[in-house]
Image (cartoon, grey):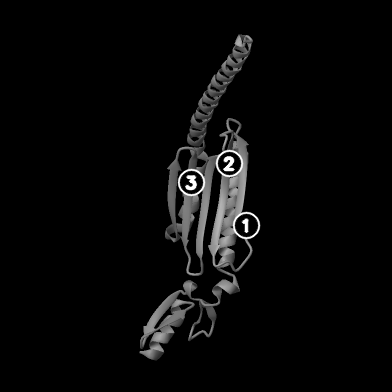
Amino acid sequence: MEDVSQLIDRIRSEFSLRKEKIKQQQAEQVEKLHERQRRLEQLEREFESLRGTWKPRLDAFAKEFGDQVVITPIVSPGQRQASLKFKSPLATVCLRFSAASDVDVRNLIVSYDLEIRPILMEFERHSEISFPIGQIDRKRLTDWLDERMIQFVQTYLAVHENPYYLKDQMVEDPVAGIRFPKFTAAATREHKGTTYYFVAEETAAEFEKSHG
C-alpha cells in the first residue's frame, strides 16, 4: 500500500490555512464594525455641535408661519429630521429637512424634500448637500439651509398666487364687485344661510346696512 501520509498532511494544511483565513476575516469584520461604531459616535457629536446651526433657523422659519405650520421633530441614531406640515386651503404641503449619514457612515448628508399635492406647477422637490464627517463646512451648510428656506417661501407663495390652485377658491365681494381668493378676505358676513366674503371691513359694513 502506498504511503498517503504526505497527502493527508497537505490536505490538513489546506484546512488549517482556511481556518486561519476565516479567523483573519472575522477579525477584520470586527474591526470594521468597531470603526463604524466609532464613526457613528462621531456623527452623533456632529449632530449635537450642528444643533446650534439648524435649530435657530427652523425655529425662526416656523415662527414666521405661525399656526400655519406644525413641526414634528424625529431623533434617531444616525439621523435627525424635522417634518413640517402646512395648513393651506389650496394644497397639502409637506416639507422635510433631514440629516443622516451614508451607508458606510463616512459622510453627513443634509436633505431638503418638498411634497405638494396636487401637483399643478413645477417646483424643486429634492436637494441635498454632503460633507465628510469631521470636515463639515458650517458656512456652506448655513448658506445652503438659508437658501432652501427662502426657496420654499417663494414656492409656497407661488402656490397661493397660482390660478390653477386658486380656481376653486375665488369669491366676489358683493359690494366692491372684486374677485379674490376667499382665504384673503378681510371680513365675512352670514345672510340668509349664505356666507359672503369682503375685501375690506368697509364693504362688509356697507353690505350690513343695505341688508339689515
Q: Report whether residue 137 is seen.
A: no
Binning the other alpha carbons within 10 Å of mark 3 as few (below 14), some (14 to 19) or many (20 upward) gives: some
- Nearer the N terminus, badge 1 or badge 2? 2
Residue linked to disc 1: 124
Q: Quadrant of residue 201?
A: bottom left
Q: Is residue 212 above or below residue 136?
A: below
Residue placed most toward the observer, 65 or 39: 39
Q: Quadrant of the N terminus?
A: top right
Q: Amino acid at mark 3?
A: Gln
Residue linked to disc 3: 81
Marks 1/2: CA distance?
A: 18 Å
Q: Amino acid at mark 2?
A: Ile
Q: Residue at x 62, y 57 (%)?
A: 124
Binning the other alpha carbons within 10 Å of mark 2 as few (below 14), some (14 to 19) or many (20 upward) gives: some
Q: Is residue 27 above or below residue 178?
A: above
Q: Residue at x 48, y 86 (%)?
A: 174
Q: Secondary structure at mark 3?
A: strand
Marks 3/1: CA distance?
A: 19 Å
The circle on residue 109 is: 2
User: Where does the image place residue 60, in percent across and percent down from the top left?
Assistant: 49, 50
- Nearer the N terminus, badge 3 or badge 1? 3
User: Where does the image place residue 128, in percent across and percent down from the top left?
Assistant: 61, 46
Q: Secondary structure at mark 2?
A: strand
Binning the other alpha carbons within 10 Å of mark 1 as few (below 14), some (14 to 19) or many (20 upward) gives: few
Q: Secondary structure at mark 1?
A: loop
Residue placed most toward the observer, 54 or 208: 54
Left or right: residue 136 versus residue 191 is: right
Q: Amino acid at mark 1?
A: Glu
Q: Residue at x 47, y 54 (%)?
A: 84
User: Where does the image place residue 108, in percent across and percent down from the top left?
Assistant: 57, 38
